[in-house]
Image (cartoon, rainbow, N blue to C red):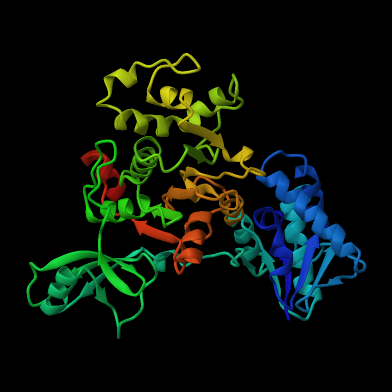
Amino acid sequence: MKTYVLDTNVLLHDPRALYVFQENNVVLPLAVIEEIDDLKRRQDEIGRNARTVSRELDELRGGGSLARGVATAKGGSVRIEVNHHDLAGGFPPTLDLGKADNRILGLAWSLVRELAEPVVLVTKDLNLRVKADVLGVPAEDFLNDKVDFEALYSGVRELHLTPGEIDAFYDQGRLPLSGRRRPHPNQFFVLKCRERPSLSALARFQAGFLTPLALAEAECLGLKPRNKEQRFALELLLDDQVKIVTLSGPAGTGKTLLALAAGLEKVMEQKTFAKLLVTRPIVPMGNDLGYLPGEKEDKLRPWMQPLYDNLQFLFRDYPALQGQKGAKGGFGAHDYLLAQGLLEMEALTYIRGRSIPGQFIICDEAQNLTPHMIKTLITRVGEGTKIVFTGDPEQIDHPYLDASSNGLTHLVEKLKAETLSGHVTLVKGERSQVAELGSRLL
C-alpha cells in the first residue's frame, strides 16, 4: 500500500483522480482545498473542475471524517491533511511556506518521515517534481491518462503481399486478411510486392477485407490530395459512415485545410449536413493580449484567423464570393458563409449543454484539450452529425498537457478499435518548402 499526496493541478486536470489509485491512500493537503476554493468561481474548464472536486469531497464527507480518512470503493481512502508547520530538521528554510506549492511539498516531506509505507507526491508541475527530488521526496506525473506517444496508432500500415495477392486485390476489388494480425477498422494500408517493386496499391480495411479507396480522388472546392496520407484522410472525411475522424501531424501537412474543404463540400455541394460548425480551444501561444473588444464574433476573430486564412485559400477561384458583404460588414468568404448560415464559429466555452444534430463539426488544435474536454465536446454530437478533430500533439500550448496526455492522443488510442471512427497521421508538409524545412529541422 502507498500514500499519494495530490497537487491541485492533478485534480483540476481530472476531478476523478481521487478514485484512480485503487487500494492506496490519497492525501489532500489543506493548501489544495484552499486553491480549489479560490478557483471555483472561474467560468471555464478549470472553474468547472474545481466545483466538481468540491462536490466530490462533500459527498465523501457524508461517508465519514475526511480528517481521519474516508474509504473508497476500491479499498483505498481519501483524507485531508492539515499542513505540517513543524518542519524543523531538514526542510530548507529558503522555501517560502507562504506559497501553496511549498506547503504541499512540506506535507509530502513530513509524511515520508512519519509513515512506514511509501509516500509519493503526484503533480503535473515539473518544477515541483524537481524540488521534491532534491529533498528526497518521490514524485511523479499523473499517469492515469497517459498514452505512449512513440507507439501511438498512426492509422496506416505497410503490408507486403505476393504478386498473385495484389492481382487478386485489383481483379476482385477486395482481399481477405486471414492468417495475419487483424487490423483496426478503417485502417489504411500501403500494399507492396517484394518480387515486383513496381506493383503496389493503397487499401482500406473494412469488414474483414482490404478494399480499394473509393473517395480519395474526389475534388473538394478545387482541392485535391497531394500525397497518400492526404488521400487516406479524404477517404475518411467524405465517408458518411465514419462519424469520428482524427487527423494528426506536423504543421503544414494539410489537416485543417482538408477538413474544411471536405466539410464545405458536404454542406454546400452534397447537402449532407445543414451547417459546418468550427471550434477551437482558446489557448494563447505566449503572453495573452487580455480582453478583446466587441461582441462574441469580434472576440473570436483573432482566434479563428487561421481558419479564415484557409477559407480564403479554398475560395480563391471565386472572385464574386470574395466580394460579398457579410453580416458584420466585413468582406471575405467566411463573412459570406456566416451570413448565409452555412458556417458557425463557436468557442468551446459555449459548447457545454448543447445538442448538435445534422452538422459537420471540426475541432481544430485539439491537442490543447484535456481528455475530459474532448469527452464534453464529443458527447454534444447529435443524430446525423460528423465530428473531426485535428491537431499536432507536438505543438501544445496548454501548461499541463504534453504529447502523451492531451485529449487528441487520448481519443486516438481509445477509439482505434471502433468501426465509427478512423485516424490518419499526416507526415509530409505541403504548405511550402519553407514551412516543411522549419517543421523538419527546427
At a point 36% along the width and 46% down the height, the residue shown is 255
Can you name the residue that lies furthest to the bottom here? 179
Q: Give residue 259's position: percent from left, percent from top.
A: 38, 44
Q: Give residue 118's position: percent from left, percent from top.
A: 71, 77
At a point 30% along the width and 18% down the height, the residue shown is 320
Left or right position of 154 against 341: left
Residue 20, picture quadrant: bottom right
Q: Give residue 345's position: percent from left, percent from top.
A: 51, 33
At a point 78% along the width and 70% down the height, the residue shown is 111
**Residue sitting nearer the eye, 438 or 275:** 275
Looking at the picture, does residue 16 appear above or below residue 117?
Answer: above
User: Dividing the image into 4 quarters, which one contains the N terminus?
Assistant: bottom right
At a point 16% along the width and 75% down the height, the residue shown is 168
Looking at the picture, does residue 267 appear above or below residue 393?
Answer: above
Residue 270, picture quadrant: top left
Looking at the picture, does residue 38 appear above or below residue 186?
Answer: above
Q: Is residue 333 visible?
A: yes
